[in-house]
Image (cartoon, grey):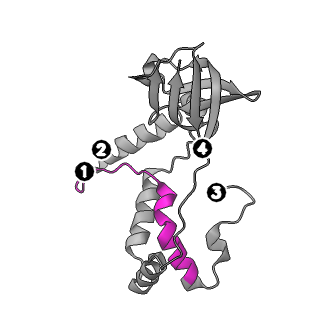
């Protein structure tokens, strides 16, 4: 949620439409929840939640997340639990409307077109120790890209991202600064 910017559900044309939209996008509210099995003792749940909350406030975690441009927006366990309970109480009519709205319609599903860019003969300025993030300059801008799923070659031979070193000259196919690289081919 961005302060001052309306959410999509704010444009619902009726309370039923709003409920349907909230049900469809509800999982996005809590993204990747951590869960314990049913019957977990209350004191253990409390300890796990406290540990999670403390971790989300850890200065090193926050600094690492900022360094790799990973936004942190934690939601407490009790809030997630209450929201999931709300989703389970969703009336059948709203579930039916959500299912109907989510059905693909012939000729209406668009294919996402990713805007891959290529930096030719870019010099690697910085390589994170693990090789997960590399920095380079292209057209006067410094860019950081994530190498996790990139095909890496050095001198034409397949290599691991951890083999990348500052000073190497590479052709880098990427989506933009802070985003993924698809291919890094170094000489």
| Secondary structure at numbered mark 3 | loop
Q: Farthest residue to the front: give it.
A: 156
The one of 57 and 114 positioned closer to us in this rendering: 114
Q: Alpha carbon of mark 1 to alpha carbon of mark 3: how far?
A: 32 Å
Mark 1 touches mark 2? (CB < 8 Å): yes
Q: Quadrant of the N terminus?
A: bottom right
Q: Is residue 97 visible?
A: yes
- From which residue to which does the magenta span run? 17-40
Mark 3 touches mark 2? (CB < 8 Å): no
Residue denoted by label 4 = 116
Residue denoted by label 3 = 1
Q: Is residue 68 visible?
A: no
Q: Alpha carbon of mark 3 to alpha carbon of mark 2: how far?
A: 31 Å
Q: Counting residues from the N terminus, which is met first, the one under dot 1 or under dot 3?
A: 3
Q: Of circles 4 and 2, which is in front?
A: 4
Residue 39 falls left or right of residue 49: left
Q: Counting residues from the N terminus, which is met first, the one under dot 4 or under dot 3?
A: 3
Q: Position of residue 166 (x, y in %)?
A: 58, 14
Residue denoted by label 1 = 40
Residue denoted by label 2 = 44
Q: Position of residue 137 (x, y in %)?
A: 69, 25
Whether the magenta-drawn stretch holds residue 30 is answered as yes
Q: Position of residue 80 (x, y in %)?
A: 44, 57
Q: Alpha carbon of mark 4 to alpha carbon of mark 3: how far?
A: 28 Å
Whether the magenta-drawn stretch holds residue 108 is answered as no
Q: Farthest residue to the left: give it.
A: 39
């Amino acid at each position: 949620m961005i302060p001052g910017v309306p959410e999509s559900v704010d444009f619902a044309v009726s309370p039923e439409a709003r409920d349907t939209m909230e049900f469809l996008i509800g999982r996005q509210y809590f993204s990747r929840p951590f869960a314990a099995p049913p019957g977990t003792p209350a004191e253990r749940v409390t300890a796990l939640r406290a540990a999670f909350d403390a971790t989300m406030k850890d200065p090193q975690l926050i600094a690492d997340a900022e360094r790799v441009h990973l936004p942190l927006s934690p939601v407490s366990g009790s809030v997630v639990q209450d929201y999931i309970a709300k989703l389970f109480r969703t009336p059948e009519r709203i579930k039916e409307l959500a299912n109907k709205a989510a059905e693909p319609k012939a000729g209406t599903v668009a294919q996402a077109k990713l805007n891959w860019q290529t930096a030719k003969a870019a010099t690697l300025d910085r390589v994170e120790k693990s090789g997960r993030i590399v920095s380079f300059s292209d057209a006067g801008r410094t860019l950081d890209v994530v190498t996790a799923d990139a095909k890496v070659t050095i001198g034409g031979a397949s290599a691991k991202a951890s083999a990348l070193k500052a000073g190497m000259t590479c052709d880098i196919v990427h989506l933009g600064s802070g985003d993924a690289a698809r291919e890094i081919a170094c000489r």
